[in-house]
C-alpha cells in the first residue's frame, strides 16, 4: 500500500480530482437525460401496444453496439471532435434509453388494471392518472432498471480513455504506459477503487430516491 | 386406511398448525377435512405424503408407518391434486398425465396410451392431449390435474381444495363427476376444503377443524348436521342445517297419491278432464313427467288444441322414490299445483305428495329420534 | 464544423472501400482471422462463465439459500470497471509470465498474459447476467407446479431437472444472451491491452494511432463487431425457440390455438432482477 500512496502523492492530485469530476458528470448526466427520454418512449410502448415489439427490438439492437464503437462513430454523426467528452455522454445516454425504455413500459404495464380502473372511477383525468397513480407505482421497477443503468454506465466510462477522452480511466492508461515505474499497478488499483466508489455512490443515491418515492413499501416491510 | 395417531405439527416459528390429531380415514371412502382458513387442513393433508413431516405422532397407511417409507417412494404411490392443478407448463396435457407412471418406469408409449384413456375418463376430449396447460380453462386444467393424480392408479389420493378456483357451475359439475368416478374407483381419499357444503356433499366422513389445528368433530355428514359436537361446529355448519339434514334422511315409503296424467299430444279437453284444482300433470310417451298444465280460464273453443311442451309450467322439481326427505319436500314446495311429483328410479311417474304429507313424515321421524335418544340416555343412566 | 463533417464523410466512404477490398479479409492478419478469434474468445469466456454461474444459479434458485449473497456479488461485479481490472491483471501478470514464446494457438505474440487477464475479467463480467437470470428464473417457477412435482414423488434433483429448469429456460437463455452480447462488445475494449487478437485489435490500434480521424479499418471493425453481436444474438434466439417448450414460451403450433382467451404464460425478462 505504501507505493500506492506514493503514487497518489507524486501524481498531481488536482489532475485526479479533475478526472473524478469529469467521471462524475459523465456518470450522472446520461442517466438523468436517458430517463427523461425513456419515460415518454416507454409510455408510448405501454399505451399503444403495437409499438412495443418494434421499440423493444430496436432498443435491444442498440444495446448490442459496443461502447467503444459508439464512442468512435458518434463524432462523425454529431460533428464533435473525437476527444470531446460529449460523445461519451451521448453514447451513455443512448444505452440508458435503450435499457430503460423496456423497463418503463413493463413497469407501467405492471400496475394492476383494478388500480387504474379505481383511479378512473375517482375522476382522475388520463394525465393525472399517469402522473399520480401509475408512475409512482412503477417507481420500484423503473428504479431497479435505473440502478443497473447507472452502475454499468460508470464502468463504461473508463473505456472512453481508449479513444482519448480523459477521465479517471486515464489511470488505467497510466498503469499500462508507465512501464518504468516500479509499482505500475498502483494507478490501476486507485482507478478501480475510485470507479467502485463512484458506482456505489450512484447506486446509493438512486436507492435512497426510490425509498423516498415509495414510502408505502417501507410501511409493508416494517 | 389412513390413520392419524396423536399427530402434531409445530412449525419452526412456533406456530402450532396441527395439535394432537387422531382419526382414521376409512379405505375406499372420501374423508373431508374442513375448517376456517389457517386451521391446519393443508398441513394435515401434506403430512400424509410427508411433504411436511409431523413433529409429533405417527401416520399409518394401512399397517405401514409412513415415517418408515422413503418420501419419494411414498409419494409415487399417492395421488396428489392441488388448488390450481399445478400442471407442468412445459409439458403437453398428455405428458403431464403420463408423468408419474414414467417416474415409476413405465415406458413412454404405454404411459401415454393410458394417459389418453384417463383423459376421457375425466371428461376431456382426446383432442386436448397435445395442448399445453396454458391453452386450457381453469376447469379443464383441474380435470387434467385429477387425471394426472390417477395415472399410476394409486390406492390413496390427497386433494387440497381441488375445485375451489373454478366458478360455481363448473365446481358442481366437477364435484358430480368426481363422485361418479369415485363410485367406480373406490379410492381412499383425503380431501381438503373450506366449503362446508362441499364437505357435506362429497364426504363419507367429515373432519371439522378449528384454528389452532384441533379436531372439533369427526363424523358422517348427517351426524354433523343433526348433532354438532359444540357451538363452534354448529356455527361452522351454519344456518339451515335442520333443513339440510333432511338431505341425508331417506324418505322411505311415502304415502303417494295417484294422479291421472295426460300425455303430450292429447287434446286439452282430455287434460281438463283429469285436472285437479285447475292443474294437470303432463307426461311423455314413456310416462316420464314433463311439467304441469294450467287449465283455469281456458275458453271452450280452445279445448280442441293439443298439449304441447311450450304450454307447460316447468317450475317443479322431481323427487325420487328412493330419495331423501329434502328432495320430497322440495318437490312439493316447488310444484305449481302444490302436489310434488315423485318418480321411480327409471324416471317414470310414481305419484304425488303434498308438503303437509312430507312434513307429517318429518315430524314422526323426529319424534322417533327423540324417543331413541331418551331411551339411550336412560340406558346410559342405568349402567 | 463543415470541415469536420466533410472529414467524416470521407471516413465513411473509406469504410465502404475497406470492407469491399478482398485482400483486407484474407490472410494471416485479415478480418476473417480476427472475426474467428473474436468468436473463439467469446465462446471460451461465455462457456466458462456459464459453467460457474449456471450450477450456482440453479442451486440458489432451487434451495432459496444464498439469494442475498448472489444479488450482492452480482451487483458488485457489475460495478467493476472492466478495462481497469484487465489492465491491473495484465500489468500484474505480464512480468510473471515469459512472453517470448511466439504465437500460442490463436494468440498473438506475447498474448498469454493478456489472454489470461481478459478471460478472467470478462468471466466476471459475464457471470452476473447468467447467475441472476438463472436463480430468478428458477425462483419464478409457479410454487404450485413445484409443489405438484414434489407431491408426485420427484426427488429434489428430478424436480430441478425435469420441471424447474425447463420452466426457467427462457430467462436462463436470455441471461446467456445478455452475457454473450456484453462479452462480444467488451472484447473490443480488452484489445487495448497488447497481445490480444479479435476485432478489437483494429479498434485499439486505430484509436492509438489516429484517434482524431477514426481510420477506415477501425470503423470497419467497429461495424463488424456490431454485426457480429446482432448475428450471434439472432442465432441464440433461434436456439431459444428450439429448446424452450411451446407451453412455456406461448408459441403453440397453430392447429391447437383454437381456445379463445388463452393467456400465454408471461415471460418476465429479468435482466432487472438485480434490485
Ligand atoms: N411453512 C410454515 N411456517 C410457519 N407457519 C406455517 C407454515 N405453513 C403454514 N403455517 C401456519 O400453519 C397454520 C395452518 O396452515 P395450513 O396451511 O395448514 O392452513 P389451512 O387450513 O390449509 O388454511 P387455508 O384454508 O387458508 O388453506 C397457519 O396458521 C399457517 O400460518
Ligand atoms: Mg390450505
Image (cartoon, helix red, strand yellow):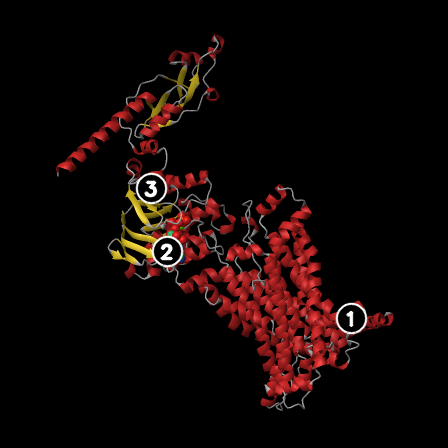
Q: Where is residue B360 in the image (x, y as percent from the top left)?
A: 28, 23
Q: Is residue B355 left or right of residue A184?
A: left
Subunit of mark 3? B
Determine whether B56 is above or below B224 in the image.
Answer: below
Determine whether B293 is above or below C224 in the image.
Answer: above
Q: Position of residue C260 (x, y in %)?
A: 55, 44
Say whether residue B55 is visible: yes
Q: Residue at x 66, y 72 (%)?
A: A156
Beta carbon of the mark 3 residue lies under 8 A of ligand 1? no
> How would you rate the neighbour count of disc 3 (Cα within 10 Å): few for under 14, some for 14-19, many for 20 or more?
some
Question: Quarter of the image containing the N terminus of chain A?
Answer: bottom right
Determine whether B266 is above or below B229 in the image.
Answer: above
Residue A75: numbered disc: 1
Do marks 3 and 2 both belong to one polypeptide chain? Answer: yes
Subunit of mark 2? B
Beta carbon of the mark 2 residue lies under 8 A of ligand 1? yes
Q: Position of residue C172 (x, y in %)?
A: 54, 64
Task: Kindly identify which residue carries mark 3.
Answer: B232
Q: What whole-number distance in Å separates the C-alpha atoms at marks 1 and 3?
A: 80 Å
Amino acid at each position: 500500500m505504501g507505493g500506492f500512496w506514493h503514487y497518489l502523492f507524486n501524481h498531481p492530485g488536482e489532475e485526479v480530482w479533475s478526472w473524478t469530476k469529469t467521471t462524475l458528470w459523465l456518470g450522472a448526466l446520461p442517466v438523468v437525460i436517458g430517463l427523461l427520454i425513456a419515460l415518454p418512449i416507454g409510455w408510448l410502448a405501454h399505451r399503444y401496444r403495437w409499438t412495443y415489439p418494434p421499440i423493444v427490438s430496436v432498443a435491444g439492437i442498440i444495446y448490442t453496439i459496443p461502447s467503444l464503437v459508439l464512442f468512435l462513430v458518434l463524432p462523425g454523426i454529431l460533428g464533435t471532435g473525437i476527444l470531446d467528452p460529449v460523445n461519451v455522454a451521448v453514447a451513455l445516454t443512448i444505452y440508458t434509453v435503450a435499457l430503460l425504455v423496456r423497463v418503463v413500459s413493463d413497469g407501467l404495464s405492471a400496475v394492476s388494471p383494478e388500480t387504474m380502473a379505481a383511479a378512473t372511477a375517482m375522476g382522475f383525468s388520463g394525465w393525472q392518472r399517469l402522473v399520480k397513480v401509475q408512475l409512482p407505482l412503477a417507481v420500484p421497477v423503473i428504479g431497479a432498471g435505473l440502478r443497473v443503468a447507472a452502475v454499468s454506465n460508470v464502468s463504461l466510462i473508463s473505456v472512453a480513455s481508449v479513444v482519448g477522452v480523459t477521465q479517471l480511466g486515464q489511470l488505467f492508461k497510466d498503469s499500462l504506459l508507465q512501464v518504468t515505474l516500479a509499482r505500475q499497478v498502483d494507478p490501476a488499483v486507485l482507478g478501480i477503487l475510485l470507479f467502485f466508489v463512484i458506482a456505489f455512490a450512484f447506486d446509493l443515491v438512486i436507492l435512497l430516491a426510490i425509498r423516498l418515492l415509495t414510502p408505502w413499501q417501507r410501511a409493508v416491510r416494517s | 386406511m389412513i390413520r392419524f395417531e396423536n399427530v402434531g405439527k409445530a412449525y419452526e416459528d412456533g406456530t402450532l398448525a396441527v395439535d394432537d390429531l387422531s382419526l382414521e380415514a376409512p379405505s375406499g371412502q372420501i374423508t373431508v377435512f374442513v375448517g376456517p382458513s389457517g386451521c391446519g387442513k393443508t398441513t394435515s393433508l401434506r403430512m400424509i405424503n410427508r411433504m411436511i413431516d409431523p413433529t409429533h405422532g405417527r401416520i399409518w397407511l394401512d399397517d405401514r408407518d409412513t415415517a418408515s417409507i422413503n418420501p419419494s417412494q411414498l409419494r409415487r404411490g399417492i395421488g396428489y391434486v392441488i388448488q390450481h392443478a399445478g400442471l407442468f407448463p412445459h409439458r403437453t396435457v398428455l405428458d403431464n398425465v403420463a408423468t408419474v407412471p414414467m417416474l415409476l418406469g413405465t415406458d413412454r408409449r404405454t404411459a401415454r396410451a393410458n394417459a389418453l384413456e384417463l383423459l376421457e375418463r375425466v371428461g376431456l376430449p382426446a383432442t386436448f392431449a397435445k395442448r399445453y396447460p396454458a391453452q386450457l380453462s381453469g376447469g379443464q386444467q383441474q380435470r387434467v390435474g385429477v387425471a394426472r393424480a390417477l395415472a399410476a392408479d394409486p390406492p390413496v389420493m390427497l386433494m387440497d381444495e381441488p375445485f375451489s378456483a373454478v366458478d360455481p357451475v363448473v365446481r358442481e359439475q366437477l364435484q358430480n363427476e368426481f363422485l361418479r368416478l369415485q363410485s367406480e374407483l373406490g379410492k381412499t381419499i383425503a380431501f381438503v376444503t373450506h366449503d362446508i357444503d362441499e364437505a357435506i356433499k362429497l364426504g363419507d366422513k367429515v373432519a371439522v377443524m378449528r384454528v389452532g389445528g384441533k379436531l372439533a368433530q369427526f363424523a358422517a355428514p348427517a351426524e354433523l348436521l343433526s348433532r354438532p359436537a359444540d357451538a363452534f361446529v354448529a356455527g361452522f355448519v351454519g344456518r339451515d342445517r335442520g333443513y339440510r339434514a333432511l338431505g341425508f334422511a331417506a324418505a322411505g315409503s311415502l304415502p303417494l297419491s295417484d294422479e291421472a296424467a295426460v300425455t303430450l299430444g292429447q287434446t286439452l279437453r282430455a287434460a281438463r278432464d283429469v285436472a285437479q284444482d285447475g292443474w294437470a300433470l303432463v307426461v311423455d310417451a314413456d310416462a316420464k313427467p314433463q311439467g304441469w298444465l294450467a287449465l283455469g280460464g281456458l275458453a271452450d273453443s280452445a279445448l280442441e288444441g293439443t298439449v304441447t311442451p311450450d304450454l307447460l309450467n316447468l317450475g317443479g322439481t322431481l323427487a325420487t322414490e328412493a330419495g331423501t326427505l329434502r328432495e320430497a319436500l322440495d318437490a312439493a314446495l316447488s310444484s305449481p299445483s302444490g302436489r310434488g311429483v315423485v318418480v321411480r328410479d327409471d324416471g317414470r311417474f310414481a305419484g304425488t305428495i303434498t308438503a303437509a304429507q312430507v312434513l307429517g313424515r318429518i315430524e314422526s321421524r323426529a319424534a322417533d329420534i327423540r324417543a331413541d335418544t331418551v331411551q339411550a340416555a336412560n340406558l346410559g343412566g342405568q349402567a | 464544423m463543415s470541415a469536420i463533417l466533410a472529414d467524416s464523410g470521407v471516413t465513411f466512404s473509406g469504410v465502404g472501400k475497406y470492407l469491399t477490398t478482398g485482400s483486407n479479409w484474407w490472410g494471416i492478419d485479415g478480418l476473417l482471422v480476427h472475426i474467428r478469434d473474436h468468436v473463439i474468445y467469446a465462446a471460451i469466456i461465455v462457456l466458462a462463465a456459464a459453467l460457474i454461474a449456471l450450477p450456482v444459479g440453479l442451486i440458489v434458485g432451487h434451495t432459496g439459500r444464498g439469494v442475498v449473497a448472489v444479488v450482492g456479488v452480482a451487483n458488485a461485479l457489475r460495478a467493476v470497471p472492466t478495462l481497469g481490472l484487465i489492465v491491473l491483471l495484465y500489468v500484474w501478470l505480464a512480468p510473471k509470465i515469459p512472453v517470448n514464446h511466439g504465437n500460442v494457438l490463436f494468440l498473438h505474440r506475447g498474448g498469454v498474459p493478456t489472454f489470461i487477464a481478459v478471460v478472467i475479467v470478462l468471466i466476471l463480467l459475464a457471470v452476473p447476467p447468467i447467475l441472476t437470470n438463472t436463480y430468478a428464473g428458477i425462483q419464478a417457477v409457479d410454487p404450485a407446479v413445484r409443489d405438484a412435482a414434489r407431491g408426485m414423488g420427484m426427488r429434489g434433483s428430478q424436480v430441478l431437472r425435469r420441471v424447474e429448469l425447463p420452466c426457467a429456460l427462457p430467462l436462463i437463455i436470455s441471461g446467456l444472451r445478455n452475457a454473450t452480447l456484453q462479452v462480444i462488445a467488451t472484447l473490443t475494449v480488452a484489445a487495448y491491452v497488447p497481445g490480444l487478437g479479435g476485432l478489437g485489435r483494429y479498434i485499439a490500434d486505430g484509436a492509438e494511432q489516429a484517434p482524431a480521424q477514426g481510420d477506415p479499418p477501425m470503423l470497419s471493425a467497429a461495424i463488424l463487431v456490431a454485426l457480429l453481436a446482432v448475428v450471434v444474438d439472432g442465432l441464440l434466439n433461434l436456439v431459444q425457440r428450439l429448446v424452450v417448450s411451446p407451453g412455456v414460451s406461448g408459441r403453440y403450433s397453430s392447429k391447437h390455438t383454437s381456445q379463445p382467451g388463452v393467456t400465454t404464460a408471461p415471460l418476465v425478462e429479468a435482466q432487472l432482477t438485480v434490485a
